Image (cartoon, helix red, strand yellow):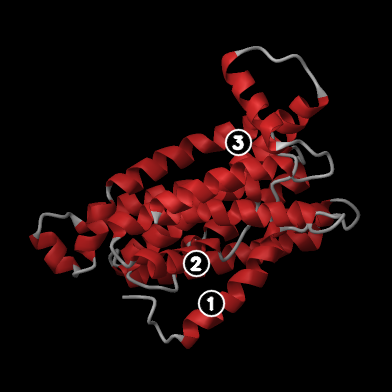
Amino acid sequence: MGVVLLVLLIFLFILSFTLGRYYVSPSEVIHILFSHIFTNVPPSIPDSVVMQIRLPRILAAMLVGATLSLAGASFQGLFRNPLVSPDILGVSAGAGFGAALAILFSGSRFTIQISAFCFALLAVTIAYAVSRVVKGHDNLSLILAGLAISSLFNASLSLMEYVANPVDQLPTIIYWLMGSLASLSLEDMFIAAVPMVIGIIILLLMRWRFNVLAMGEEEAQSMGVNVSQFRIIIVICCTMISAAAVCISGIIGWVGLVIPHISRLLVGPDHKRLLPVCLLLGALYLLLIDDIARTASSLEIPLGILTAMIGAPFFIYMLSRRGKGWT
């Protein structure tokens, strides 16, 4: 299954460069990409379209889809709950508030991304601290603290929207919240890619421990797994990669909830296979969604709208199976 997904991802990666108002053939795309690796390429319109406009967007779509899916599968495995998604601890709410705050007081793209990333981390940090103060640091108290902090940051986001200038600031906030990869540069993508890649590597290296944890915390401890330490590492990694994804893409829901379920249907609940498949399928899924978003109409469709239109019906289908997809 992993090989099939990888082949499909490579095929869609090349195909995505050819989509758009300015047509670039697949052979021309491959030639431009290899030319930039091995030689200096003189400026041209096809080269600018491929390297400066479409390449950052395509890489970002793959990376954001992969990280959100991996974070969703990791959180579902950690909390042993199929309804958990990457924003359960307040990542999206914190990022949304941070972005809105930066739009009100600055407006620069770099400031918005940094503010969204920092407030996403802050929201999860507060949620974790509250869970320890209220009732130790078990899974249930952490989830409940995350829901409370999410509600608090969502209320603060509504306040930002209320006081925003309705002519320019409010539309910018609303558009950011709906999710988009337009106007990304390679520099933006590479800066966000650093924490994403680090988090992805750590999660993949620790994927076998999810199988041990699935047998229960006491059994995991008896087999040498430090559950408290493992929980902290997973929360930090998932928060870091989710925050980095949200800060460059805006809030794109349902990916981290739906893709792990589809992956589980394809390869089963073994996390040694589930997490790599989640990674590939998430990248494939969001790249396809982004291709649809920028080609389906003359105006670009926000990614959050498309993922919700696909994710919600699929989730209803999963509910109709009465949990058969979660074993």
Q: What residue did someone put label 2 on?
A: 257
Determine contact: label 1, label 2, CB under 8 Å: yes
Q: What residue did someone put label 1 on?
A: 315
Up-down: is 4 above or below 305? above
- What residue is rendered at 62% in x and 12% in y? 39
Badge 2 amino acid: Leu
- What residue is rendered at 48% in x and 84% in y? 319
Identify which residue, 218 or 285, lies in the foreground: 285
In this figure, what is the number of numbered marks? 3
Q: Is residue 282 left or right of residue 104?
A: left
Badge 3 amino acid: Met
In the rendered image, residue 233, in percent from the top left (x then y), is placed at 31, 49
- The residue carrying pointer 2 sits among few (fewer than 14), some (14 to 19) or many (20 or more) residues within 10 Å by Cα, namely many
In the rendered image, residue 261, in percent from the top left (x then y), is placed at 44, 69
Q: CA distance from mark 1 to mark 3?
A: 30 Å
Sequence-wise, which precedes: disc 1 or disc 2?
Answer: 2
Q: What residue did someone put label 3 on?
A: 189
| Residue 124 shows in the view | no
Identify which residue, 187 or 283, lies in the foreground: 283
Q: Is residue 305 left or right of residue 163?
A: left
Badge 1 amino acid: Phe
Sequence-wise, which precedes: disc 2 or disc 3?
Answer: 3
Identify which residue, 60 or 103, lies in the foreground: 60
